[in-house]
Image (cartoon, rainbow, N blue to C red):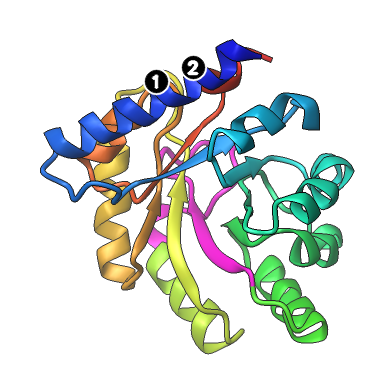
Amino acid sequence: MGDTVQQFFAVKARIAAAEQEAARQAGAVTLVAVSKTFDAADIQPVIEAGQRVFGENRVQEAQGKWPDLKLAFPDIELHLIGPLQSNKAKEAVALFDVIETVDREKIAAELAKEMARQGRAPKLYVQVNTGSEPQKAGIEPRDAVAFVTRCRDVHGLAIEGLMCIPPADENPGPHFALLEKLGREAGVEKLSMGMSGDYETAIAFGATSVRVGSAIFGSR
């Protein structure tokens, strides 16, 4: 497991260098360590090395490992970065501190209902499908600003940021630039963009958090 911790510190160093290169403030970018498919034993050394923000793709998988880890390390911030089904809204609100994948009216309504019921308010991001890929979750770019407004005005949700996953075979730069522009238009402060292969580019375009999995934990 020594490798994982070394890789974690290497990623942290590259984020710091990318911040400097982009003339961003040191510490401006949050590392979300993507721990999906890895179990608690793989994750714990990274927590012990100081990492506190983690990302999971699936509600059910996260339920199997995070409640105990969060008890042991109460300052952990857990992000849902995979698609959310409306029938999982209850569990998602109970477990996650940040939900990055709000992308349709039905989810917004379910989250609003659950947050009121549970008295819990995870931070929320709207996922934008910047490449308009039919197989991918996320709201169309042209609808994103209006959707953020509806989340606020109709559902009473405080939307903190936007998130995107650019098409795998395209230059990510224009997608990051588009998300940054939409974020300004929607009046949100946070941009979750950039993964293991392109997080330094994302930092240059204004990412406030990057979601890095394989560069830390290795391939799944």
Whether 38 is drawn above or below 146: the answer is above
Whether 179 is drawn above or below 167: the answer is below
Residue 136 drawn at (x, y percent) = 59, 38
Residues packed near mark 1 inside 10 Å, few (<14), some (14 to 19) or many (20 plus) = some
User: Which residue carries the number 1 mark?
Assistant: 10
- Quadrant of image for the C terminus: top right
Q: Does the magenta stretch include residue 129?
A: yes
Residue 11 drawn at (x, y percent) = 40, 25
Give yes or no for contact between labels 1 and 2 (Cβ–Cβ under 8 Å): yes
Instruction: Tell me the number on the disc at residue 88.
Output: none
Residue 156 drawn at (x, y percent) = 58, 87
Relative to residue 123, is residue 31 drawn left or right?
Answer: left
Question: Secondary structure beneath disc 2?
Answer: helix
Whether residue 135 can be seen here:
no
Residue occupying image coordinates x 81% and y 80%: 118
Residue occupying image coordinates x 49% and y 25%: 8
Residue 48 figure quarter: top right
Callout 2 amino acid: Gln
- Magenta range: 122-143
Label 1 – label 2 distance at C-alpha: 6 Å
Question: Secondary structure beneath disc 1?
Answer: helix
Instruction: Tell me the number on the disc at residue 6.
Output: 2
Relative to residue 64, is residue 186 drawn left or right?
Answer: left
